Amino acid sequence: MPEPLTHVRQISHIAYGFMASQALFAALNIGLFGHISNGKRTLESLCALTGIAEHRLKTLMAVLVSLGLVVREKDGFTNAPATERYLVPGAHAYFGDYYRFQIDRQIYHYMPHVHAGLAGDPGGLAHESMGGLLADPRNARDFSKAQHAGSLGPAKLMAEQIDLSGAETLLDVAGGTGAYSITFCEKYPALRATILDFPSVIEVAREYVTNAGMAGRIGLIGGDATKTAWPEQQTVVLMSYLLSAVGGGQIPALLDSAWKALAPGGRLIIHDFMLHEDREGPLSAALFFLSYLALRTDPISFTAGELTPLLSARGFTHISSGEMIPEITGFILAQKV
């Protein structure tokens, strides 16, 4: 159970949180952490590398040091361990593009429209659903590039936790740029996959699939998963971050589509933000659910337990669930008999 707040300063940390995020985004967008990487940098050298005037960069550095992202030493600045691992371009676990392209350029700017979503005011939303957001090719490219960076880690986690040995086909619904399809196909040489996503996203996916050398094994279908027919006789259907992005009333139909698309004995994998069964967290999942109210008035938040009866009602068996990304996402496995 989350600890109840006891001091106004704790409330202030929540209210001022957007200021800290802007400091992170600003540093990423000027390549600061990459300039500091693998050594110490003086303020003067960082000014020369970034082109930022000393008095302005000095202000930013004070924030980054206060946040623990950067360490101030006697003869310069170094990256904190987590910064070096996750925020330096080229690092194996680099995550900065996810923050830059999706959180900074998109989610940050549409979050003020949550007020309209809560009020049930479609006219005040940031976009008309996720499809509206991704209808613009530039938005689709930025979102997809960021999502690919953010999905590679979870895709590897999923491939470690969920055994697809013997699976012949994988239908990756709302599969984006193919992080999951590519990862599973790399692990299982006999597996073939199909990605279904909006046409604007599929154009970006084509580049990632080709660059991964998977053009012959991963097919691409441009369409809206709530309207486009899904290929049938699939061994596995994967829906990652799909149910949270649609209206609550659309979820039963999507589960029907999954059942129809699966061959007998096939498996459904649902990966998404998941609340604890007591709905008292985790905070990150709860916040992402909230963010969808900026895009539409009918999304819902859910737990694995709340989705289970919907699966059972459609005939799915062997239903199990677990955590995928700690404190953010979970998964549900179900089988078509």
Image (cartoon, rainbow, N blue to C red):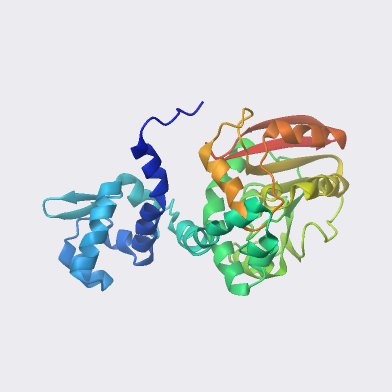
Q: Is residue 143 something one can see in this rendering?
A: yes
Viewer-proximal residue among 297 and 97: 297
Q: Is residue 256 left or right of residue 51?
A: right
Residue 129 in which image quadrant: bottom right
Q: Is residue 179 something one can see in this rendering?
A: no
In percent of the image, x 62 and y 38: which residue is there? Answer: 274
Measured as percent of width and height from the top left, residue 289 is found at 61, 46
The C terminus is located in which quarter?
top right
Asked if 238 appears above or below 274 in the picture, the reply is below
Measured as percent of width and height from the top left, residue 132 is found at 68, 66
Viewer-proximal residue among 158 and 222: 222
Q: Is residue 207 left or right of residue 257?
A: left
Asked if 218 appears above or below 321 in the picture, the reply is below
Asked if 145 appears above or below 325 in the picture, the reply is below
Measured as percent of width and height from the top left, residue 310 is found at 81, 36
Q: Is residue 119 left or right of residue 263?
A: left
Viewer-proximal residue among 50 and 104: 104
Name, please, the residue furthest toward the top: 1
In percent of the image, x 34 and y 65: which residue is there? Answer: 31
Residue 325 in which image quadrant: top right
In percent of the image, x 44 and y 50: which residue is there? Answer: 93
In percent of the image, x 77 and y 62: which residue is there? Answer: 224
Total of numbered circles in the picture?
0
Measured as percent of width and height from the top left, residue 277 is found at 64, 29
Name, please, the residue furthest toward the left: 74
